[in-house]
């Protein structure tokens, strides 16, 4: 069974601060896929990134960066120089290879104050 | 390109009424997923289809829920009769699985969701 844990329920920061969201996962599959989604106040779920378990290279996209550590089963997400528009709920998700179900974490609510 | 389209965006109904939620996946995608989001249970998968065939419906809560995919561009999720505990946001997502044998093309893209309130 797949399990994703996002221990941080809520994070509040002041604009321009960096914020890191933790994601820890459990799976028995040797190959698996990790995702981050953003849910802004408007409610839609927006895909941010996908990471394959066999590719441990970290990735940066603008102010967003992701740190995949297979040894600690973690896939953390950092927003650099946060902006008010980053305020949202962020979900980490995991898919194994036995089927196509996504297992979501509980989400972390990020509030960026001006 | 158009994303996943869901209708209605909001639905308010009374207990006992039939509710039908609709989804149009991204053109060319071969898999479709229905999720439900509640405060208590978070995001949970209800059912998914591959090439219009239901593959796994183990997440469907009970017989009051049914889903169909009559063709590659349309799916429905029906609740009959509806109950207050069915109040939630229902998301539809689509993806392209195993195109050309590649496993990395199956990212799920979500629709805007339908917020259902059963009074």
Image (spheres, coloured by chain):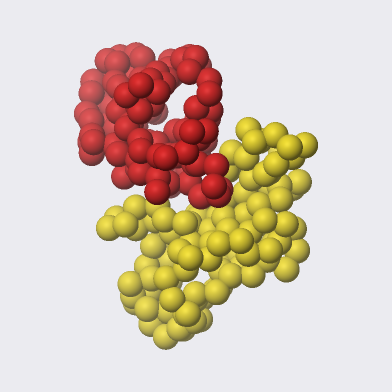
Q: Position of residue A20 (x, y in %)?
A: 30, 22
Q: Give the left or right position of residue B99, taking residue B46 as reference.
A: right
Q: Colour of chain B?
A: yellow
Q: Give the left or right position of residue A48, taking residue B26 as reference.
A: left
Q: Nearer the viewer, residue A18 or A55?
A: A55
For the point 29% across and 37% down, the residue is A6
Q: Where is residue A113 in the image (x, y as percent from the top left)?
A: 25, 26
- Vertical placement of residue B16 versus A53, above or below: below
Q: Colour of chain A?
A: red
For the point 58% across and 70% down, the residue is B67
The quarter of the picture where the C terminus of chain A appears is top left
For the point 46% across and 64% down, the residue is B59
Q: Position of residue A1 (x, y in %)?
A: 40, 48
Q: Nearer the viewer, residue A54 or A63?
A: A54
Q: Give the left or right position of residue A57, taking residue A88 as reference.
A: right
Picture quadrant where residue B71 is located: bottom right
Q: Give the left or right position of residue B75, taking residue A57 as reference.
A: right
Residue A37, visible in the rendered structure: no
Residue B80, visible in the rendered structure: yes
- Vertical placement of residue B30 versus B1, above or below: below
- Vertical placement of residue B51 versus A52, above or below: below
Q: Where is residue A22 in the image (x, y as percent from the top left)?
A: 30, 28
For the point 35% across and 21% down, the residue is A71
Number of numbered labels in the structure image: 0
């Amino acid at each position: 069974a797949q399990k994703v844990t996002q221990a941080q329920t809520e994070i509040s920061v002041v604009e321009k601060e960096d914020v890191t969201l933790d994601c820890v996962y459990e799976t028995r599959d040797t190959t698996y896929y990790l995702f981050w989604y953003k849910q802004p106040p408007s409610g839609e779920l927006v895909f941010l990134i996908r990471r394959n378990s066999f590719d441990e290279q970290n990735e940066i996209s603008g102010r967003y960066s992701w740190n995949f550590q297979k040894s600690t089963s973690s896939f953390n997400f950092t927003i650099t120089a946060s902006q008010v528009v980053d305020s949202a709920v962020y979900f980490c998700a995991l898919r194994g290879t036995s089927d196509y179900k996504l297992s979501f974490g509980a989400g972390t609510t990020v509030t960026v104050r001006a | 390109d158009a994303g996943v389209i869901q209708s209605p965006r909001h639905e308010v109904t009374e207990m006992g009424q039939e509710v039908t939620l609709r989804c149009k996946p991204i053109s060319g995608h071969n898999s479709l997923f229905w999720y439900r989001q509640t405060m208590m249970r978070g995001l949970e998968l209800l059912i998914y289809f591959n090439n219009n065939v239901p593959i796994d419906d183990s997440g469907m809560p009970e017989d009051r829920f049914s889903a169909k995919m009559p063709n590659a561009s349309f799916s429905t999720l029906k609740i009959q009769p509806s109950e207050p505990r069915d109040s939630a946001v229902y998301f539809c997502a689509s993806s392209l699985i195993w195109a050309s044998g590649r496993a990395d093309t199956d990212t799920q893209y979500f629709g805007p969701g339908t917020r259902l309130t059963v009074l």
